[in-house]
Image (cartoon, helix red, strand yellow):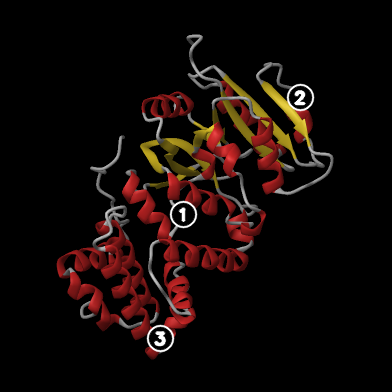
Amino acid sequence: MPEQSPLVSIIMPVYNGEAFLQEAINSVLKQTYTNWELLVINDGSTDGSRDVVLANTDPRVRLIDNEQNMGIIHTRNRGIDLASGKYIAWLDADDIALPTRIEKQVRFLEKYPDCGAVATIFQQLTTDGTLGKVYEFPTGRKEVKTHLLIENCICNSSTMLPATLMKNSKYLHEFEVAEDYELWDRVSSSHYICIIPEILTHYRVHGNNVSIKKKEQMFVTVKHLSARMLAAAGLGFTDKQLELHSDLISYSNKLTASGADFKEMEKWVVTILKHFRHLDTYDYPTMYRMMAERHAVACVHTKRYARLFWNPIMRMHPFKYLAIVIAKLRGQSIKFPKSNNAPV
């Protein structure tokens, strides 16, 4: 690479990740972009993870040992402190960065220096190496900001950020299990985030994923985060509305089993849509699509099938709502159109 190519610090925390660690390291070694350092932060592993790292002779691969197991947030933040690159990229110890990922993300951030973070489309990877579902999310700045209000559309293991921003932000312990989601909300409040519309990351799915093992803690943490995001967008809410909101966006539908609560949920969705319809920093079509989809799922889960075809959300945009319902009934994913407000 030319001498002027900026250094990228790729941070890879690992705790007892021997099974897939070398595969993850190999994906970095195969990058078309070569001016990088790989900081593998060993968080007190008791398996052979440390030996796997030491077996790599490339001087760009560095092993850093925690004195004891400190947890993922401490380990990520330590990597941030030790990074010396202009940019920081993340890759978990069981995931794969496709060969051109770092090159394309550096090119993007060099071209758009006001961008706070750039992620990629990602695809599931099973423990036996089989590729699965492709996660396609909106890619533009307004669409990503809007999507983050409802769910995390950023795969942490696919991201790259300016190091100065990452060092001033870091991950917060009080949002454990959703610390990455919280980070993207903070970044999006002062910078824009984009997603390169290309599969450049393979995300490993197995029983050790935090989001599978700690669902209840995740629900509580995301509810706390939702309250912060709604308030920041200028939308007031009661405790009951926040409960209904969290229940709906998580597809839980526990509260909406009650007829009275279901009607309150529908009123709340209409309130959200009316509020965001005229806010220039958000994308209303993305908001409507996501809320309508969740309402349709709630109708099916609670066996209120008649509400699929006559409800206040549908009356706002009848044809759009029915298109979403038909897609869901057919088991089709909702496609997000190519952004017209993003530097992608």
Sequence-wise first label, 3 or 1: 1
**33 vs 72: above or below:** above
Callout 2 secondary element:
helix
Query: In this image, 247 relative to 50: left or right?
Result: left
Kind of residue indicated by mark 2: Leu
Residue at the spot 75% in from the left edge and 35% down from the top edge: 49
Residue extending furthest left? 319
Sequence-wise first label, 2 or 3: 2
| Residue receiving disc 1 | 152
Q: Nearer the viewer, residue 184 or 302?
A: 184
Mark 1, Cα crowd under 10 Å, few <14 / some 14-19 / many 20+, is some
Callout 1 secondary element:
loop
**73 vs 291: above or below:** above
| Residue receiving disc 3 | 261
Percent position of residue 188, x then y: 44, 48
- Measure the C-alpha gap from mark 2 to mark 1: 35 Å
Residue extending furthest right? 67
Mark 3, Cα crowd under 10 Å, few <14 / some 14-19 / many 20+, is some
| Residue receiving disc 2 | 54
